[in-house]
Image (cartoon, coloured by chain):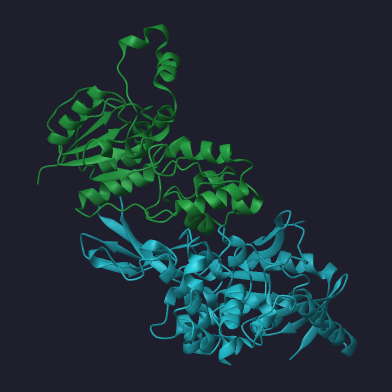
Amino acid sequence: MAKPKIAFFDFAGCEGDQLQIANLEERLLDILGHVEVVSFREVATGHSDDYDVAFVEGSITRPEDEIRLKEIRKNAKVLVALGACACIGGINCLKNFMAENVYREEVYGGQARWFSTYAARPLKSVVHVDAEVPGCPIDPTEFARITKELLQGRAPWIPDFPVCVECKQAGNVCRYEMGRMCLGIITRAGCKAACVSEGAHCWGCRGLVPGANLDAARIVMDRAGSDRKATQDLLRFFLGDTGAAL
Amino acid sequence: MTTYTVYKEQLPGLFEKWSKQYALHVPARLREGFYDLVPWKKDLEIAWDYDVAYNSPKRFVMPPHEALITYDRRTCEAQPVFEAPKQILFGVHPYDVKALNQLDQLMEGGSPDQNYLRRREATVVMVFEPLTVSSSAFWASVGAASVAHGFDLYWTKIGPAAFTVEVGSAKGEELLGMNGPLLSSTAGDKEGARRAKARVLAKARKNALRYNWEETPRLLAKCWDSPLWRRYSQMCLACGSCNLVCPTCYCFDIREETDDKLETGVRSREWDGCMLEGFAKVAGNHNFRPKAQDRYRHRYFRKGKYIYDKIGELGCVGCGRCVRACTAGIANPLKVFNELWEETAHEY
Protein backbone atom coordinates (compact mmCIF):
# COMPACT_ATOMS: atom_id res chain seq x y z
CA MET A 1 0.00 0.00 0.00
CA ALA A 2 1.30 3.43 -0.94
CA LYS A 3 2.08 5.74 1.95
CA PRO A 4 -0.60 8.38 2.55
CA LYS A 5 0.51 11.83 1.42
CA ILE A 6 0.14 14.56 3.99
CA ALA A 7 0.37 18.34 3.74
CA PHE A 8 0.36 21.20 6.23
CA PHE A 9 -1.38 24.53 5.65
CA ASP A 10 -1.78 27.65 7.72
CA PHE A 11 -4.16 30.58 7.88
CA ALA A 12 -4.31 33.33 10.51
CA GLY A 13 -2.20 32.05 13.37
CA CYS A 14 1.33 31.92 14.69
CA GLU A 15 2.26 28.55 13.18
CA GLY A 16 3.07 27.49 16.71
CA ASP A 17 1.22 24.22 16.24
CA GLN A 18 3.46 23.19 13.36
CA LEU A 19 6.37 24.17 15.56
CA GLN A 20 5.02 21.82 18.24
CA ILE A 21 5.04 19.04 15.65
CA ALA A 22 8.62 19.88 14.69
CA ASN A 23 9.38 19.73 18.43
CA LEU A 24 8.59 16.02 18.39
CA GLU A 25 12.13 15.68 16.97
CA GLU A 26 13.24 12.01 17.02
CA ARG A 27 9.66 10.80 17.40
CA LEU A 28 8.75 12.71 14.25
CA LEU A 29 11.08 10.54 12.18
CA ASP A 30 9.28 7.34 13.21
CA ILE A 31 5.82 8.80 12.66
CA LEU A 32 6.75 10.35 9.31
CA GLY A 33 8.11 6.97 8.25
CA HIS A 34 4.50 5.90 7.62
CA VAL A 35 3.59 8.88 5.45
CA GLU A 36 4.92 11.04 2.65
CA VAL A 37 5.06 14.72 3.51
CA VAL A 38 4.40 16.75 0.40
CA SER A 39 4.09 20.14 2.04
CA PHE A 40 5.36 21.36 5.41
CA ARG A 41 6.88 24.76 4.99
CA GLU A 42 8.10 25.10 8.55
CA VAL A 43 10.28 22.01 8.17
CA ALA A 44 10.99 21.49 4.46
CA THR A 45 10.80 23.32 1.14
CA GLY A 46 8.64 22.17 -1.75
CA HIS A 47 4.90 21.86 -2.24
CA SER A 48 2.43 19.64 -4.07
CA ASP A 49 -1.34 19.69 -4.39
CA ASP A 50 -1.49 15.90 -4.44
CA TYR A 51 -2.24 14.88 -0.84
CA ASP A 52 -4.58 12.63 1.17
CA VAL A 53 -4.52 14.27 4.57
CA ALA A 54 -4.41 18.03 5.12
CA PHE A 55 -3.44 19.41 8.51
CA VAL A 56 -4.70 22.97 8.64
CA GLU A 57 -3.65 25.54 11.19
CA GLY A 58 -5.04 29.03 11.83
CA SER A 59 -8.44 30.65 11.61
CA ILE A 60 -10.33 32.14 8.69
CA THR A 61 -10.22 35.93 8.82
CA ARG A 62 -10.61 37.07 5.18
CA PRO A 63 -13.07 36.22 2.39
CA GLU A 64 -10.21 34.96 0.20
CA ASP A 65 -9.21 32.45 2.94
CA GLU A 66 -12.49 30.66 2.30
CA ILE A 67 -11.62 30.03 -1.35
CA ARG A 68 -8.22 28.61 -0.42
CA LEU A 69 -9.65 26.43 2.35
CA LYS A 70 -12.37 25.04 0.08
CA GLU A 71 -9.68 24.15 -2.44
CA ILE A 72 -7.74 22.29 0.27
CA ARG A 73 -10.92 20.50 1.33
CA LYS A 74 -11.50 19.43 -2.27
CA ASN A 75 -7.99 17.98 -2.61
CA ALA A 76 -7.87 16.21 0.75
CA LYS A 77 -9.61 12.98 1.74
CA VAL A 78 -9.17 13.86 5.40
CA LEU A 79 -8.95 17.39 6.80
CA VAL A 80 -7.59 17.82 10.29
CA ALA A 81 -7.84 21.15 12.14
CA LEU A 82 -4.70 21.91 14.07
CA GLY A 83 -4.78 24.11 17.17
CA ALA A 84 -7.20 26.52 18.81
CA CYS A 85 -7.34 29.01 15.90
CA ALA A 86 -8.37 26.30 13.45
CA CYS A 87 -10.65 24.36 15.82
CA ILE A 88 -12.51 27.15 17.65
CA GLY A 89 -11.30 30.42 16.14
CA GLY A 90 -9.11 31.04 19.18
CA ILE A 91 -7.76 34.41 20.17
CA ASN A 92 -8.30 35.78 16.66
CA CYS A 93 -11.96 35.98 17.62
CA LEU A 94 -11.16 38.68 20.19
CA LYS A 95 -11.51 41.15 17.37
CA ASN A 96 -15.09 40.02 16.80
CA PHE A 97 -16.04 41.96 19.92
CA MET A 98 -14.51 45.18 18.62
CA ALA A 99 -15.83 47.62 16.06
CA GLU A 100 -14.36 46.90 12.64
CA ASN A 101 -12.86 50.36 12.19
CA VAL A 102 -11.15 50.07 15.57
CA TYR A 103 -9.31 46.80 14.96
CA ARG A 104 -8.50 47.64 11.34
CA GLU A 105 -6.95 50.92 12.43
CA GLU A 106 -5.09 49.15 15.25
CA VAL A 107 -3.57 46.51 12.97
CA TYR A 108 -3.05 48.26 9.65
CA GLY A 109 -2.96 51.91 10.64
CA GLY A 110 -3.21 54.29 7.73
CA GLN A 111 -3.23 51.43 5.19
CA ALA A 112 -6.37 49.83 6.63
CA ARG A 113 -8.29 50.29 3.39
CA TRP A 114 -5.76 48.18 1.47
CA PHE A 115 -6.57 44.96 3.32
CA SER A 116 -9.68 42.84 3.38
CA THR A 117 -10.70 41.29 6.68
CA TYR A 118 -13.85 40.03 8.39
CA ALA A 119 -14.91 38.37 11.63
CA ALA A 120 -12.51 35.56 12.57
CA ARG A 121 -13.95 32.04 12.54
CA PRO A 122 -12.84 28.42 12.85
CA LEU A 123 -12.38 26.10 9.86
CA LYS A 124 -15.60 24.23 10.62
CA SER A 125 -17.57 27.42 9.90
CA VAL A 126 -16.44 27.12 6.27
CA VAL A 127 -15.81 23.45 5.46
CA HIS A 128 -16.39 20.02 6.97
CA VAL A 129 -13.60 19.11 9.39
CA ASP A 130 -12.90 15.40 9.91
CA ALA A 131 -10.77 15.55 13.03
CA GLU A 132 -9.46 18.12 15.46
CA VAL A 133 -6.24 18.45 17.41
CA PRO A 134 -7.26 21.17 19.89
CA GLY A 135 -5.19 23.42 22.12
CA CYS A 136 -3.05 26.52 22.11
CA PRO A 137 -0.57 25.28 21.31
CA ILE A 138 -1.40 21.67 20.48
CA ASP A 139 0.07 18.91 22.63
CA PRO A 140 2.57 17.17 20.35
CA THR A 141 1.91 13.81 22.01
CA GLU A 142 -1.79 14.18 21.24
CA PHE A 143 -0.96 15.06 17.64
CA ALA A 144 1.18 11.92 17.45
CA ARG A 145 -1.57 9.75 18.90
CA ILE A 146 -4.28 11.14 16.62
CA THR A 147 -2.03 10.72 13.58
CA LYS A 148 -1.38 7.11 14.53
CA GLU A 149 -5.09 6.49 15.01
CA LEU A 150 -5.78 7.91 11.54
CA LEU A 151 -3.03 5.71 10.10
CA GLN A 152 -4.63 2.65 11.67
CA GLY A 153 -8.01 3.60 10.31
CA ARG A 154 -9.45 4.23 13.77
CA ALA A 155 -11.74 7.13 14.63
CA PRO A 156 -9.43 9.72 16.22
CA TRP A 157 -10.31 10.19 19.87
CA ILE A 158 -10.16 13.41 21.85
CA PRO A 159 -11.46 13.65 25.40
CA ASP A 160 -15.17 14.44 25.72
CA PHE A 161 -14.90 15.43 29.39
CA PRO A 162 -13.77 18.68 31.02
CA VAL A 163 -10.33 19.58 32.36
CA CYS A 164 -11.58 18.93 35.93
CA VAL A 165 -11.06 15.22 35.27
CA GLU A 166 -7.39 15.68 34.50
CA CYS A 167 -6.96 18.06 37.43
CA LYS A 168 -8.35 15.43 39.76
CA GLN A 169 -6.10 12.80 38.17
CA ALA A 170 -3.14 15.11 38.72
CA GLY A 171 -4.26 15.79 42.30
CA ASN A 172 -4.28 19.59 41.86
CA VAL A 173 -6.00 21.80 44.41
CA CYS A 174 -9.07 23.23 42.66
CA ARG A 175 -8.74 26.91 41.69
CA TYR A 176 -12.29 27.53 42.90
CA GLU A 177 -11.36 26.23 46.35
CA MET A 178 -8.57 28.81 46.29
CA GLY A 179 -11.13 31.49 45.47
CA ARG A 180 -9.97 31.84 41.87
CA MET A 181 -11.73 31.54 38.53
CA CYS A 182 -10.94 28.77 36.08
CA LEU A 183 -12.43 27.63 32.78
CA GLY A 184 -11.60 23.99 33.40
CA ILE A 185 -15.22 23.31 34.32
CA ILE A 186 -16.38 23.77 30.70
CA THR A 187 -13.20 23.17 28.70
CA ARG A 188 -12.39 19.98 26.83
CA ALA A 189 -9.62 18.03 28.55
CA GLY A 190 -6.59 16.47 26.88
CA CYS A 191 -3.91 18.91 28.02
CA LYS A 192 -3.30 16.95 31.26
CA ALA A 193 -4.49 20.12 33.03
CA ALA A 194 -1.16 21.69 32.08
CA CYS A 195 -1.93 25.30 33.09
CA VAL A 196 -3.47 24.42 36.45
CA SER A 197 -0.68 21.98 37.26
CA GLU A 198 1.78 24.83 36.65
CA GLY A 199 -0.08 27.11 39.06
CA ALA A 200 -2.23 29.10 36.63
CA HIS A 201 -5.88 28.49 35.76
CA CYS A 202 -7.55 27.11 32.65
CA TRP A 203 -8.02 29.58 29.80
CA GLY A 204 -10.27 27.38 27.70
CA CYS A 205 -7.89 26.97 24.75
CA ARG A 206 -9.21 23.51 23.86
CA GLY A 207 -12.73 24.76 23.37
CA LEU A 208 -15.98 23.81 25.02
CA VAL A 209 -16.55 20.28 26.21
CA PRO A 210 -19.56 18.70 24.45
CA GLY A 211 -22.70 19.42 26.46
CA ALA A 212 -21.07 22.14 28.58
CA ASN A 213 -23.58 23.54 31.10
CA LEU A 214 -22.92 27.22 30.39
CA ASP A 215 -25.73 28.57 32.58
CA ALA A 216 -24.34 26.75 35.60
CA ALA A 217 -20.78 27.71 34.67
CA ARG A 218 -21.65 31.41 34.59
CA ILE A 219 -23.20 31.19 38.06
CA VAL A 220 -20.16 29.32 39.40
CA MET A 221 -17.77 31.82 37.79
CA ASP A 222 -19.72 34.82 39.02
CA ARG A 223 -19.57 33.45 42.57
CA ALA A 224 -15.81 33.12 42.31
CA GLY A 225 -14.95 36.15 40.20
CA SER A 226 -14.44 39.64 41.43
CA ASP A 227 -16.77 41.15 38.83
CA ARG A 228 -18.79 40.31 35.75
CA LYS A 229 -16.18 41.87 33.47
CA ALA A 230 -13.53 39.40 34.64
CA THR A 231 -15.83 36.49 33.76
CA GLN A 232 -16.58 38.00 30.37
CA ASP A 233 -12.93 38.65 29.56
CA LEU A 234 -11.97 35.10 30.41
CA LEU A 235 -14.81 33.62 28.36
CA ARG A 236 -13.96 35.77 25.35
CA PHE A 237 -10.25 35.00 25.42
CA PHE A 238 -10.41 31.70 23.55
CA LEU A 239 -14.12 30.97 23.38
CA GLY A 240 -15.20 34.02 21.39
CA ASP A 241 -16.71 31.93 18.61
CA THR A 242 -18.70 29.70 20.99
CA GLY A 243 -21.93 30.21 22.91
CA ALA A 244 -19.92 30.69 26.09
CA ALA A 245 -18.80 34.25 25.41
CA LEU A 246 -21.11 36.87 26.83
CA MET B 1 -4.70 -7.08 70.29
CA THR B 2 -1.23 -5.86 71.20
CA THR B 3 -0.86 -2.15 71.76
CA TYR B 4 2.44 -0.32 72.14
CA THR B 5 3.23 3.18 73.26
CA VAL B 6 5.55 5.08 70.94
CA TYR B 7 7.08 8.51 71.46
CA LYS B 8 7.51 11.19 68.82
CA GLU B 9 11.30 11.17 69.10
CA GLN B 10 11.31 7.56 67.87
CA LEU B 11 9.57 8.48 64.63
CA PRO B 12 12.37 10.02 62.53
CA GLY B 13 14.45 6.87 63.06
CA LEU B 14 11.58 4.61 62.08
CA PHE B 15 10.67 6.71 59.04
CA GLU B 16 14.31 6.67 57.96
CA LYS B 17 14.38 2.85 58.11
CA TRP B 18 10.99 2.39 56.45
CA SER B 19 11.76 4.79 53.62
CA LYS B 20 14.74 2.65 52.64
CA GLN B 21 12.44 -0.28 51.82
CA TYR B 22 9.17 1.41 51.03
CA ALA B 23 7.83 4.52 49.35
CA LEU B 24 6.64 6.25 52.53
CA HIS B 25 3.75 8.72 52.34
CA VAL B 26 2.82 10.93 55.28
CA PRO B 27 0.24 13.69 55.82
CA ALA B 28 1.57 17.21 55.28
CA ARG B 29 0.20 20.69 54.68
CA LEU B 30 0.03 21.69 51.01
CA ARG B 31 -1.08 25.28 51.73
CA GLU B 32 -3.34 26.99 54.25
CA GLY B 33 -6.27 24.65 54.83
CA PHE B 34 -5.17 21.94 52.38
CA TYR B 35 -3.46 18.70 53.35
CA ASP B 36 -2.44 15.59 51.51
CA LEU B 37 -0.36 12.44 51.82
CA VAL B 38 3.03 13.33 50.34
CA PRO B 39 6.33 11.45 50.01
CA TRP B 40 8.24 11.60 53.29
CA LYS B 41 11.58 13.31 53.42
CA LYS B 42 13.83 14.25 56.29
CA ASP B 43 12.61 17.25 58.32
CA LEU B 44 9.19 17.25 56.65
CA GLU B 45 6.66 18.53 59.16
CA ILE B 46 3.89 16.01 59.64
CA ALA B 47 0.40 17.51 59.79
CA TRP B 48 -0.95 15.52 62.75
CA ASP B 49 -4.03 17.71 62.91
CA TYR B 50 -5.01 17.42 59.24
CA ASP B 51 -8.76 17.30 58.70
CA VAL B 52 -8.88 15.42 55.39
CA ALA B 53 -6.28 14.45 52.79
CA TYR B 54 -7.08 16.44 49.64
CA ASN B 55 -6.68 13.36 47.46
CA SER B 56 -8.17 10.06 48.53
CA PRO B 57 -5.85 7.10 49.12
CA LYS B 58 -7.34 5.15 46.20
CA ARG B 59 -4.67 6.69 43.96
CA PHE B 60 -2.09 4.50 45.70
CA VAL B 61 -3.87 1.26 44.87
CA MET B 62 -5.65 2.32 41.71
CA PRO B 63 -3.62 5.07 40.06
CA PRO B 64 -5.27 7.55 37.66
CA HIS B 65 -3.39 5.96 34.75
CA GLU B 66 -2.29 2.37 34.80
CA ALA B 67 -0.91 0.09 32.08
CA LEU B 68 -2.72 -3.26 31.94
CA ILE B 69 -1.16 -5.08 29.00
CA THR B 70 1.43 -4.56 26.30
CA TYR B 71 0.79 -6.07 22.89
CA ASP B 72 2.66 -6.73 19.70
CA ARG B 73 0.73 -6.10 16.50
CA ARG B 74 3.11 -8.20 14.41
CA THR B 75 2.82 -11.40 16.41
CA CYS B 76 -0.61 -10.73 17.93
CA GLU B 77 0.73 -11.49 21.39
CA ALA B 78 -0.05 -9.73 24.64
CA GLN B 79 1.65 -9.62 28.02
CA PRO B 80 0.07 -8.49 31.28
CA VAL B 81 1.70 -5.56 33.09
CA PHE B 82 1.81 -5.63 36.87
CA GLU B 83 3.25 -2.81 38.88
CA ALA B 84 3.14 -3.00 42.62
CA PRO B 85 5.60 -0.68 44.35
CA LYS B 86 6.13 -1.37 48.04
CA GLN B 87 4.58 1.53 49.88
CA ILE B 88 3.57 2.66 53.35
CA LEU B 89 0.59 4.96 53.74
CA PHE B 90 1.18 6.53 57.14
CA GLY B 91 -1.56 8.52 58.84
CA VAL B 92 -4.61 7.48 56.84
CA HIS B 93 -7.86 8.32 58.61
CA PRO B 94 -10.25 5.48 59.53
CA TYR B 95 -12.97 6.49 57.04
CA ASP B 96 -10.42 6.28 54.22
CA VAL B 97 -9.36 2.83 55.42
CA LYS B 98 -13.00 1.83 55.37
CA ALA B 99 -13.08 2.98 51.76
CA LEU B 100 -9.98 0.88 50.98
CA ASN B 101 -11.58 -2.14 52.66
CA GLN B 102 -14.64 -1.62 50.53
CA LEU B 103 -12.54 -1.45 47.36
CA ASP B 104 -10.79 -4.67 48.46
CA GLN B 105 -14.12 -6.45 48.70
CA LEU B 106 -15.37 -5.17 45.36
CA MET B 107 -12.12 -5.84 43.52
CA GLU B 108 -11.85 -9.38 44.90
CA GLY B 109 -15.39 -10.27 43.96
CA GLY B 110 -16.41 -11.63 40.58
CA SER B 111 -13.37 -11.59 38.33
CA PRO B 112 -10.59 -10.52 40.72
CA ASP B 113 -8.74 -7.38 39.63
CA GLN B 114 -5.15 -8.59 39.64
CA ASN B 115 -3.60 -5.16 39.13
CA TYR B 116 -5.47 -3.74 42.10
CA LEU B 117 -4.88 -6.74 44.36
CA ARG B 118 -1.14 -6.78 43.75
CA ARG B 119 -0.80 -3.10 44.53
CA ARG B 120 -2.89 -3.54 47.68
CA GLU B 121 -0.77 -6.50 48.75
CA ALA B 122 2.35 -4.33 48.51
CA THR B 123 0.77 -1.53 50.54
CA VAL B 124 1.14 -1.10 54.29
CA VAL B 125 -1.66 0.96 55.83
CA MET B 126 -1.11 2.85 59.06
CA VAL B 127 -4.25 4.47 60.39
CA PHE B 128 -4.15 7.66 62.38
CA GLU B 129 -7.03 8.69 64.61
CA PRO B 130 -8.09 12.16 63.38
CA LEU B 131 -7.64 15.14 65.68
CA THR B 132 -9.79 17.54 63.67
CA VAL B 133 -12.79 17.11 61.40
CA SER B 134 -13.34 18.76 58.03
CA SER B 135 -16.40 21.03 58.00
CA SER B 136 -17.91 19.00 55.15
CA ALA B 137 -17.29 15.57 56.70
CA PHE B 138 -19.96 13.39 58.27
CA TRP B 139 -18.17 10.06 58.64
CA ALA B 140 -19.33 9.55 62.20
CA SER B 141 -22.92 9.14 61.05
CA VAL B 142 -22.37 6.65 58.22
CA GLY B 143 -20.63 3.95 60.22
CA ALA B 144 -17.14 5.01 59.17
CA ALA B 145 -15.73 6.39 62.41
CA SER B 146 -13.61 3.33 63.09
CA VAL B 147 -12.25 0.28 61.35
CA ALA B 148 -11.59 -3.13 62.82
CA HIS B 149 -9.44 -4.48 59.98
CA GLY B 150 -7.62 -3.45 56.84
CA PHE B 151 -4.71 -1.76 58.60
CA ASP B 152 -1.26 -2.84 59.75
CA LEU B 153 -0.94 -0.32 62.58
CA TYR B 154 -3.45 2.01 64.22
CA TRP B 155 -1.92 5.17 65.66
CA THR B 156 -3.65 7.37 68.24
CA LYS B 157 -2.10 10.54 69.60
CA ILE B 158 -2.52 10.47 73.38
CA GLY B 159 -0.35 13.43 74.32
CA PRO B 160 1.87 16.13 72.83
CA ALA B 161 4.56 13.59 72.01
CA ALA B 162 3.07 10.15 72.67
CA PHE B 163 1.05 7.67 70.65
CA THR B 164 -0.57 4.34 71.25
CA VAL B 165 -0.09 1.98 68.35
CA GLU B 166 -2.47 -0.93 67.98
CA VAL B 167 -1.08 -3.79 65.94
CA GLY B 168 -3.22 -4.96 63.04
CA SER B 169 -0.82 -7.35 61.33
CA ALA B 170 2.46 -9.18 61.84
CA LYS B 171 4.05 -7.00 59.17
CA GLY B 172 2.96 -3.88 61.04
CA GLU B 173 4.45 -5.15 64.28
CA GLU B 174 7.70 -6.02 62.52
CA LEU B 175 7.95 -2.53 60.99
CA LEU B 176 7.25 -0.89 64.34
CA GLY B 177 9.94 -2.96 66.04
CA MET B 178 12.67 -2.21 63.53
CA ASN B 179 14.54 0.11 65.90
CA GLY B 180 14.58 -2.13 68.93
CA PRO B 181 12.25 -3.38 71.65
CA LEU B 182 8.86 -1.77 72.15
CA LEU B 183 7.02 -0.52 75.18
CA SER B 184 3.66 -2.12 75.86
CA SER B 185 0.91 0.39 76.50
CA THR B 186 -0.23 0.82 80.08
CA ALA B 187 -3.90 0.80 81.00
CA GLY B 188 -3.60 4.58 81.35
CA ASP B 189 -2.27 4.94 77.78
CA LYS B 190 -5.12 2.85 76.45
CA GLU B 191 -7.59 5.00 78.34
CA GLY B 192 -5.92 8.03 76.75
CA ALA B 193 -6.53 6.53 73.31
CA ARG B 194 -10.15 5.84 74.15
CA ARG B 195 -10.61 9.45 75.23
CA ALA B 196 -8.87 10.80 72.13
CA LYS B 197 -11.32 8.80 70.06
CA ALA B 198 -14.28 10.09 72.06
CA ARG B 199 -13.08 13.68 71.64
CA VAL B 200 -12.89 13.51 67.86
CA LEU B 201 -16.17 11.64 67.65
CA ALA B 202 -17.89 14.46 69.52
CA LYS B 203 -16.61 16.87 66.85
CA ALA B 204 -17.48 14.58 63.97
CA ARG B 205 -21.06 14.08 65.12
CA LYS B 206 -21.87 17.75 64.48
CA ASN B 207 -22.63 16.87 60.86
CA ALA B 208 -24.97 13.93 60.90
CA LEU B 209 -27.70 12.11 59.07
CA ARG B 210 -31.07 12.61 60.72
CA TYR B 211 -31.71 8.89 60.65
CA ASN B 212 -29.81 5.64 61.06
CA TRP B 213 -27.59 5.22 57.97
CA GLU B 214 -28.87 1.67 57.45
CA GLU B 215 -32.21 3.15 56.38
CA THR B 216 -30.60 4.77 53.32
CA PRO B 217 -31.27 2.00 50.77
CA ARG B 218 -34.92 1.79 51.81
CA LEU B 219 -35.16 5.57 51.73
CA LEU B 220 -33.74 5.74 48.20
CA ALA B 221 -36.03 2.99 46.96
CA LYS B 222 -38.90 5.38 47.60
CA CYS B 223 -37.22 8.39 46.02
CA TRP B 224 -36.58 7.42 42.39
CA ASP B 225 -39.04 10.06 41.19
CA SER B 226 -38.17 12.74 43.71
CA PRO B 227 -38.06 16.30 42.32
CA LEU B 228 -34.81 16.73 44.21
CA TRP B 229 -32.74 15.07 41.46
CA ARG B 230 -33.79 17.62 38.89
CA ARG B 231 -33.52 20.56 41.28
CA TYR B 232 -29.88 19.85 42.06
CA SER B 233 -28.76 18.48 38.72
CA GLN B 234 -29.75 21.67 36.88
CA MET B 235 -26.48 23.07 38.17
CA CYS B 236 -24.44 19.96 37.33
CA LEU B 237 -21.40 20.71 35.17
CA ALA B 238 -20.90 16.99 34.45
CA CYS B 239 -17.24 17.43 35.39
CA GLY B 240 -16.89 14.16 37.29
CA SER B 241 -15.07 15.83 40.21
CA CYS B 242 -17.36 14.17 42.79
CA ASN B 243 -16.53 10.74 41.32
CA LEU B 244 -12.83 11.31 41.01
CA VAL B 245 -12.22 12.61 44.52
CA CYS B 246 -14.43 9.88 46.01
CA PRO B 247 -12.40 7.24 47.89
CA THR B 248 -14.84 4.49 46.89
CA CYS B 249 -15.51 5.34 43.22
CA TYR B 250 -13.49 2.97 41.10
CA CYS B 251 -14.82 3.13 37.52
CA PHE B 252 -12.28 3.31 34.74
CA ASP B 253 -12.08 3.61 30.98
CA ILE B 254 -9.81 1.57 28.72
CA ARG B 255 -7.49 3.20 26.17
CA GLU B 256 -4.93 1.91 23.74
CA GLU B 257 -1.97 3.54 22.08
CA THR B 258 0.56 2.03 19.70
CA ASP B 259 4.19 3.06 19.55
CA ASP B 260 5.40 5.39 16.82
CA LYS B 261 6.51 2.49 14.61
CA LEU B 262 2.98 1.04 14.85
CA GLU B 263 4.44 -2.27 15.98
CA THR B 264 3.74 -2.59 19.69
CA GLY B 265 1.25 -0.93 22.00
CA VAL B 266 -0.04 -0.46 25.53
CA ARG B 267 -3.56 -0.92 26.78
CA SER B 268 -4.19 1.10 29.90
CA ARG B 269 -6.98 2.21 32.16
CA GLU B 270 -7.79 5.69 33.34
CA TRP B 271 -10.16 7.00 35.98
CA ASP B 272 -13.66 7.57 34.67
CA GLY B 273 -16.83 8.70 36.39
CA CYS B 274 -20.57 8.15 36.03
CA MET B 275 -21.26 11.89 36.21
CA LEU B 276 -19.43 12.43 32.91
CA GLU B 277 -21.72 12.65 29.92
CA GLY B 278 -19.66 10.19 27.87
CA PHE B 279 -19.57 7.55 30.62
CA ALA B 280 -22.76 5.80 29.54
CA LYS B 281 -22.16 6.24 25.83
CA VAL B 282 -22.07 2.87 24.06
CA ALA B 283 -21.90 1.58 20.50
CA GLY B 284 -23.80 3.63 17.95
CA ASN B 285 -23.42 6.73 20.16
CA HIS B 286 -26.36 5.56 22.27
CA ASN B 287 -26.31 7.02 25.77
CA PHE B 288 -28.29 5.19 28.42
CA ARG B 289 -27.96 8.05 30.96
CA PRO B 290 -28.14 11.09 28.70
CA LYS B 291 -29.45 13.65 31.20
CA ALA B 292 -27.60 15.23 34.10
CA GLN B 293 -30.59 14.29 36.23
CA ASP B 294 -30.17 10.57 35.43
CA ARG B 295 -26.49 10.69 36.19
CA TYR B 296 -26.90 12.69 39.39
CA ARG B 297 -29.51 10.28 40.72
CA HIS B 298 -27.39 7.32 39.70
CA ARG B 299 -24.47 8.49 41.80
CA TYR B 300 -26.62 8.76 44.96
CA PHE B 301 -28.24 5.41 44.30
CA ARG B 302 -24.80 3.96 43.81
CA LYS B 303 -23.58 5.35 47.14
CA GLY B 304 -26.76 4.73 49.11
CA LYS B 305 -28.28 1.60 47.62
CA TYR B 306 -26.43 -0.36 44.96
CA ILE B 307 -23.23 -0.81 46.99
CA TYR B 308 -25.31 -1.62 50.07
CA ASP B 309 -27.21 -4.27 48.13
CA LYS B 310 -23.89 -5.85 47.20
CA ILE B 311 -21.90 -5.75 50.45
CA GLY B 312 -24.17 -4.40 53.19
CA GLU B 313 -22.54 -1.04 53.77
CA LEU B 314 -22.93 2.43 52.31
CA GLY B 315 -20.80 3.37 49.33
CA CYS B 316 -20.23 6.70 51.05
CA VAL B 317 -17.78 6.94 53.96
CA GLY B 318 -18.62 10.55 54.74
CA CYS B 319 -15.21 12.05 53.98
CA GLY B 320 -16.86 15.14 52.50
CA ARG B 321 -14.40 15.41 49.59
CA CYS B 322 -17.13 15.64 46.95
CA VAL B 323 -18.81 18.41 48.91
CA ARG B 324 -15.62 20.46 48.67
CA ALA B 325 -14.75 19.50 45.10
CA CYS B 326 -18.12 20.38 43.57
CA THR B 327 -17.78 23.90 42.17
CA ALA B 328 -21.53 24.01 41.54
CA GLY B 329 -22.23 23.18 45.20
CA ILE B 330 -24.60 20.32 44.47
CA ALA B 331 -22.58 17.25 45.50
CA ASN B 332 -23.48 16.60 49.10
CA PRO B 333 -24.62 13.12 50.17
CA LEU B 334 -25.45 14.29 53.69
CA LYS B 335 -27.70 17.09 52.47
CA VAL B 336 -29.31 14.99 49.74
CA PHE B 337 -30.04 12.02 52.03
CA ASN B 338 -31.37 14.30 54.79
CA GLU B 339 -33.62 16.18 52.37
CA LEU B 340 -34.98 12.95 50.95
CA TRP B 341 -35.62 11.80 54.51
CA GLU B 342 -37.62 14.95 55.24
CA GLU B 343 -39.48 14.65 51.95
CA THR B 344 -40.66 11.15 52.82
CA ALA B 345 -41.00 11.60 56.60
CA HIS B 346 -44.78 11.57 56.43
CA GLU B 347 -44.64 8.02 55.09
CA TYR B 348 -43.23 6.65 58.33
Residue for point 66% across, 87% down? B148
Image quadrant in which you'd find residue A13: top left
Q: Where, by quadrant of the figure, is residue B96 drawn?
A: bottom right
In this view, the residue in front, B79 or B130, is B130
Residue at image point 28% right, 23% down: A62
Q: Residue at x 18, y 32 (%)?
A: A70
Q: Name the spot of residue B319 as percent of width and height, x first.
A: 64, 72
Residue at the far front: name it: B346
Q: Is residue A171 visible?
A: yes
B307 sits to left or right of B317: left
Residue A182, position as x, y percentages in the image: 55, 46
- Residue found farthest to the top: A110
Going by the image, does B273 lie left or right of A71? Answer: right
Residue B181 seen in the current view: no
Residue at the extreme right of the image, as rendered: B188
Q: Colour of chain A?
A: green
Q: Is residue B281 above or below residue A112?
A: below
Q: Nearer the viewer, residue B17 or B285?
A: B285
Q: Residue at x 74, y 57 (%)?
A: B42
Q: How many marks?
A: 0
A95 vs A187, nearest the viewer: A95
B175 left or right of A149 in image:
right
* Chain B shade: cyan
- Horizontal and vertical percent for residue A52? 15, 39
User: Residue A10 is drawn in which quadrant?
Assistant: top left
The x and y percentages for residue A156 are: 27, 51
Question: Where B156 sits versus B327, above or below?
Answer: below
